[in-house]
Image (cartoon, rainbow, N blue to C red):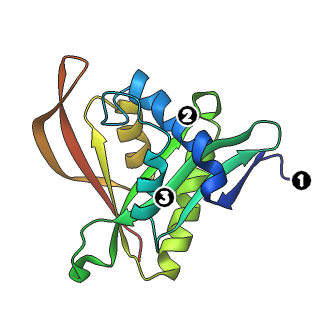
Amino acid sequence: MNDFPYTIRPIDDTHSKSVMTILNHYIENSFAAYFDHPLPDFFFDKIREMIKGYPAFVACESKEGVVGFAFLHAYHPAPTFRRTAEITYFIHPDHTRKGLGKFMLDELITQALKQNIDNIVASISSLNSASLTFHVKNGFHECGRLEGIGRKCERDFDVVYMQRHIG
């Protein structure tokens, strides 16, 4: 019997409010999202444009609805990089550390391989130790670092690039 309470669904316009609520939580309360002010709901349209043609979904829990989202998008617009995608995912804080991040990562990898994507890159704030640890634990390695290029909440941070070859 599987007691895992989460399912995934393809992301669509009905998820706009939930996705933006989760994203804005991380913008306002952490270094996990780079923006320094909450984004308006219409920013979801920019996300939808960015993810066209790439795996993208929401994670749902039966009682609460959308509790997370995940997607891949182009690492670079040049076709020479079409085998590489950048990953983005956020989980409502009440649902972290329950296996949902790994579940979403595994699903993104499965879908990416079907689209001939064999490298995934993550861009992570050096002040987001939980994400850095998660990615190392899940097969990513640091492949680059831009030192001191970000500033949020009066604190400078590095952008750490992590990569996982999946193909």
Give the alpha-carbon distance from disc 1 to disc 3, as whole Å.
28 Å
Query: What secondary structure is found at the residue carrying circle 1?
Result: loop
Side of 63 where 155 appears, left or right? left
Q: Indicate the position of residue 37 as horizontal and vertical percent values.
A: 34, 27
As drawn, 127 above or below 2: above
Q: Indicate the position of residue 94 as horizontal and vertical percent values.
A: 64, 27
As drawn, 27 above or below 89: above
Name which residue type carries label 1: Met
- Nearer the camera: disc 1 or disc 2: 2
Give the alpha-carbon distance from disc 1 to disc 2, as whole Å.
32 Å
Name which residue type carries label 3: Phe
Report the number of numbered marks.
3
Residue at horizontal 84 percent and vertical 52 percent from the top: 2
* Rendering quarter of residue 72: bottom left
Q: Indicate the position of residue 120 as horizontal and vertical percent values.
A: 36, 64
- Nearer the camera: disc 3 or disc 2: 2
Instruction: Sort mark 2 into few (<14), some (14-19) or many (20+) by Cα contacts within 10 Å.
Output: some
* Rendering quarter of residue 140: bottom left
User: Front-most of 127 and 54?
Assistant: 54
Residue at horizontal 68 percent and vertical 57 percent from the top: 8
- The tag on residue 21 is 2
Give the mark, 3 or 2, whose residue is nearer the N terminus. 2
User: Front-most of 118 and 49?
Assistant: 49
Residue at horizontal 52 percent and vertical 81 percent from the top: 114
Give the mark, 1 or 2, whose residue is nearer the N terminus. 1
Side of 147 where 132 appears, left or right? right
Single out the residue that lies furthest toward the right.
1
Give the mark, 1 or 3, whose residue is nearer the N terminus. 1
Asked if one can make out residue 34 in the rendered structure from this viewpoint, the answer is yes
Please name the residue that numbered disc 3 is placed on. 71
Please name the residue that numbered disc 1 is placed on. 1
